[in-house]
C-alpha cells in the first residue's frame, strides 16, 4: 500500500511556492512539530480503528458499516476521516466507495509519541490533547451514547480549547497569521472591520496586530461570536491589541441568521473577516451573500480556512470537529461536512455574488502535492 505521510517536512520542499507569504508565518520549530504530529495522527487513527474493531482484509463500505453496527447516520464524516487517514498513511487502500484495511498493529502507543512531542516542545500539548480527547469520544459518539458537543466541550475542557485556538500553539497559529496577512494586504487605510466567529480571540489578535503594523489601524472593530464564553474572552484579547482610537464593540452574531435581524447594518464594513468559521454555515452561499451585503463599496471578505485537498481528501485536524453536530450537519448541497476544497469555495463565493477570489498561498494545490498535510490558506473575495 502506498504511503504519502508521514514525510520528513522541510520548508525547502516548497521551493518558491510560498514566496507570496510573509516570512514570519511559520515558526522555525514548525516543520519538526508537524512531523511529530503526523506520526501521532497516523498511530491514533490505527488505535481508533482497532478500538472500533474495523475489519481488516475485507472491503469496508461506510454506509454498510454504519448499518451493521447500528451507529448513528451522522457518523459518516468521522468514519470518512478515519478511513481516509488510514489510506493517507498507507494502512488502507481505496476501492471506489470502500476501503481495504491492512495490518494495524506494530507501533508505539500514541501516548508515548505525545510524551516525546511535548518534551521536544511543550507548546504543542493542546493539539495532542484535543486529538486524544476526540479519539476517546469516538466510540460513544458513533454509538449515539453521547453527543460530540458534550464529549468535547464542558467546564473541564474550556481551558484546553482556549489554549488550542491560540497563537501560542505553533500548530494552529499559522491559520491566523495567513488570514491576518491576507487581511492586511486587502484592507485600505482605517478600515471598518467586522469579525465573525471570533472565538477566543486568537485570530483577532493577529489581524489587529498586522493591520496596525502596516498603518491600517481599524477605524472600528466589531468582534462577534456565537458562544457567550468565547465572546467574553475573545473580546478582551481582541481589544488589547487595538489602540484606544479604534471604536471597539463585541456582540453576538450568528452567520446562519439574516444580518438584518442582528446588531449590524448593511454596507457598513470595509473588511469582513473570519478564521475557521464560515465552513460551519448551514447554507454556505446564503451565508456568504449575507456577509457580502455587509460590505461597503470596495469592501473585501477574507476567510482563513483549512482547505480540503481535492476530491474527498482528509484534513489531519478534522477528527474532533467531525464529532460535532454543527460540523456534521453542514454536509449536503454538493459539499462534504465541514472543510471544503478550493474549487468548492470558489463556486460558493461566485454563487454569492463575489466576482474576484484570490487564495493565499496562491500555489496551495502544488504545496499539497509536495506535502499532503498542507491545507492552511486564506481566501480573499471582492
Ligand atoms: C474554529 S472556531 C474559530 C476560532 C477563532 N477564529 C479564534 O481565533 O479563536 C469556530 C468558531 O465559530 C463559532 N461558530 C459556530 N457556529 C457559528 C455560527 N452559526 N455563527 C457564528 N459563529 C459560529 C464557534 O463558536 C467558534 O468560536
Image: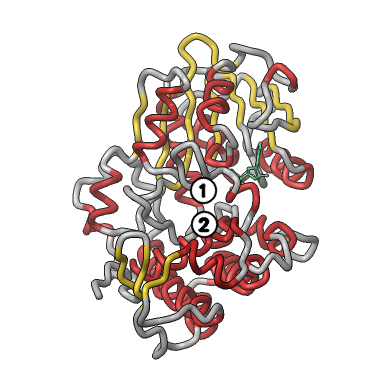
Question: Compared with residue 146, is residue 211 higher up or lower down, i.e. above or below?
Answer: above
Residue farthest toward the left in the current orientation of the protein: 15
Residue farthest toward the top in the current orientation of the protein: 297
Whether residue 262 appears in this view of the structure is: yes
Q: Quadrant of the C terminus?
A: top left
Instruction: Find out whether the residues at labels 2 and 1 contact each other: C-beta distance under 8 Å.
Output: yes
Q: Quadrant of the N terminus?
A: bottom left
Instruction: Tell me the tag on residue 337.
Output: 1
Q: Of the two numbered discs 2 and 1 on the same chain, state the one appearing first in sequence.
A: 2
Identify the residue at image location x=58%, y=41%. Answer: 280
Identify the residue at image location x=24%, y=72%. Answer: 2
Mark 2 Cα shell of 10 Å, populated few (<14), some (14-19), many (≥20): many
Q: Which residue is mark 2?
A: 77
The foreground one among 46 and 270 is 46
Whether residue 115 appears in this view of the structure is: no
Q: Secondary structure at mark 2?
A: helix
- Separation of marks 2 and 1 at Cα, in angstroms: 6 Å
Name which quarter of the figure residue 136 lies in: bottom right
Amino acid at each position: 500500500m502506498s504511503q504519502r505521510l508521514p514525510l520528513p517536512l522541510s520548508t525547502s520542499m516548497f521551493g518558491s511556492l510560498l514566496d507570496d507569504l510573509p516570512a514570519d508565518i511559520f515558526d522555525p520549530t514548525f516543520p519538526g512539530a508537524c512531523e511529530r504530529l503526523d506520526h501521532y495522527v497516523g498511530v491514533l487513527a490505527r488505535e481508533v480503528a482497532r478500538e472500533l474493531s474495523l475489519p481488516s482484509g475485507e472491503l469496508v463500505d461506510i454506509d454498510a458499516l454504519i448499518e451493521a453496527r447500528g451507529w448513528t447516520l451522522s457518523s459518516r464524516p468521522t468514519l470518512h476521516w478515519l478511513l481516509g487517514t488510514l489510506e493517507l498513511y498507507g494502512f488502507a487502500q481505496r476501492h471506489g466507495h470502500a476501503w481495504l484495511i491492512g495490518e494495524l498493529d506494530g507501533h508505539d502507543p500514541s501516548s508515548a509519541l505525545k510524551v516525546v512531542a511535548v518534551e521536544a516542545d511543550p507548546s504543542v500539548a493542546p493539539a495532542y490533547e484535543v486529538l486524544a480527547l476526540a479519539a476517546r469520544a469516538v466510540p460513544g459518539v458513533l454509538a449515539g451514547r453521547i453527543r460530540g458537543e458534550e464529549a468535547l466541550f464542558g467546564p473541564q475542557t474550556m481551558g484546553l480549547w482556549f489554549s488550542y485556538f491560540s497563537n501560542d500553539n505553533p500548530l494552529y497559529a499559522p491559520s491566523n497569521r495567513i488570514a491576518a496577512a491576507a487581511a492586511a494586504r486587502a484592507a485600505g487605510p482605517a478600515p471598518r472591520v467586522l469579525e465573525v466567529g471570533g472565538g477566543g480571540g486568537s485570530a483577532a489578535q493577529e489581524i489587529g496586530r498586522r493591520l496596525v503594523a502596516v498603518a491600517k489601524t481599524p477605524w472600528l472593530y466589531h468582534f462577534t461570536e456565537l458562544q457567550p464564553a468565547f465572546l467574553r474572552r475573545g473580546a478582551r484579547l481582541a481589544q488589547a491589541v487595538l489602540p484606544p482610537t479604534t471604536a471597539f464593540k463585541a456582540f453576538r452574531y450568528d452567520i446562519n441568521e439574516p444580518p438584518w435581524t442582528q446588531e449590524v447594518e448593511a454596507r457598513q464594513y470595509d473588511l469582513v473577516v473570519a478564521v475557521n468559521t464560515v465552513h460551519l454555515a448551514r447554507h454556505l452561499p446564503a451565508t456568504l451573500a449575507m456577509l457580502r451585503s455587509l460590505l461597503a463599496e470596495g469592501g473585501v471578505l477574507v476567510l482563513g480556512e483549512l482547505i480540503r485537498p481535492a476530491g474527498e481528501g482528509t484534513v489531519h485536524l478534522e477528527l474532533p470537529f467531525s464529532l460535532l453536530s454543527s460540523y456534521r450537519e453542514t454536509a449536503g448541497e454538493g459539499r462534504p461536512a465541514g472543510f471544503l476544497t478550493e474549487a468548492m469555495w470558489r463556486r460558493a463565493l461566485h454563487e454569492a455574488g463575489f466576482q474576484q477570489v484570490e487564495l493565499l498561498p496562491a500555489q496551495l494545490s502544488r504545496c499539497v502535492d509536495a506535502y499532503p498535510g498542507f491545507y492552511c490558506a486564506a481566501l480573499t473575495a471582492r
